[in-house]
Amino acid sequence: MKKIALAVLIVVGPLNLAFADDYVIDGSDGGMHSSIHFKASHVGISSLWGRFNGLTGIFSYSADDIAATIIDVSIRPASIDSNHEARDTHLRTSDYLDVDSYPAARFVSSSVEDLGNGRVKVNGSLSLHGVAKDVSFEAVRTGEGESPFGDYRVGFEGEMVLNTGDFGINAGSVELVLAIEGIRQ
């Protein structure tokens, strides 16, 4: 059997297979080096900025095979933080996020396309407020390598505009700013 395997390697040559590494998102359960911020119009006069503090997820990634990337991220809408507790309490009600009925939002990728120079296009399904919709956004790899914490990390940033009405929420368009740092497992 060893002779057959050796003969295959000699005839075919060494296989150059790229395997994706698994990463855990460094979010609220890690060290909070990942975030999802939002920006919304405030009465047409200024912008309201906030973030979701409850972010967890995993992804598989290889720079040599971007198309093999898989992403699965969960967000706790109740973790909304707009720097104003009374507003956050209202945003958690059935007027907006209805966190009692919909305690989780989730994004699962369907494909990731290599756009070159560290840029990717991410396509997938976003489930929010009991509605699942296909979404896509561009992201850029911001860095990759050994960290001072003794592990290996990769980071990405991206932005997308979300029409909240598509998900049954009356908050207009919201810009999401994503900063994700993964820790290789």
Image (cartoon, grey):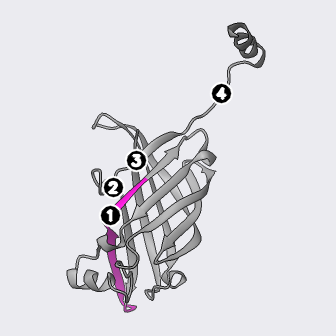
Q: From mark 3 to mark 4, how far is it between C-alphas?
A: 26 Å
Q: From mark 3 to mark 2, how far is it between C-alphas?
A: 9 Å
**Label 2: few (<14), some (14–19) or many (≥20) C-alpha neighbours in 10 Å:** many
Name the side, left or right, on which 48 lies relative to 15.
left
Q: Which residue is mark 1?
A: 54
Q: From mark 2 to mark 1, how far is it between C-alphas?
A: 7 Å
- Whether tag 2 and tag 1 are in contact, CB under 8 A, the answer is yes
Q: Which residue is mark 4?
A: 16
Q: Residue at x 51, y 54 (%)?
A: 71
The quarter of the displayed image where residue 100 is located: bottom left
- Tell me which label, 1 or 3, sits earlier in the chain: 3
Q: Residue at x 40, y 91 (%)?
A: 44
Q: From mark 4 to mark 2, how far is it between C-alphas?
A: 33 Å
Q: Which residue is mark 3?
A: 24
- Whether tag 4 and tag 1 are in contact, CB under 8 A, the answer is no
**Of helix, strand and loop, which one carries label 1?**
loop
Q: Amino acid at mark 4?
A: Asn
Magenta residues span 43-57
**Of helix, strand and loop, which one carries label 4?**
loop
Nearest to the eye among marks 3 and 4: give it: 3
**Label 1: few (<14), some (14–19) or many (≥20) C-alpha neighbours in 10 Å:** many
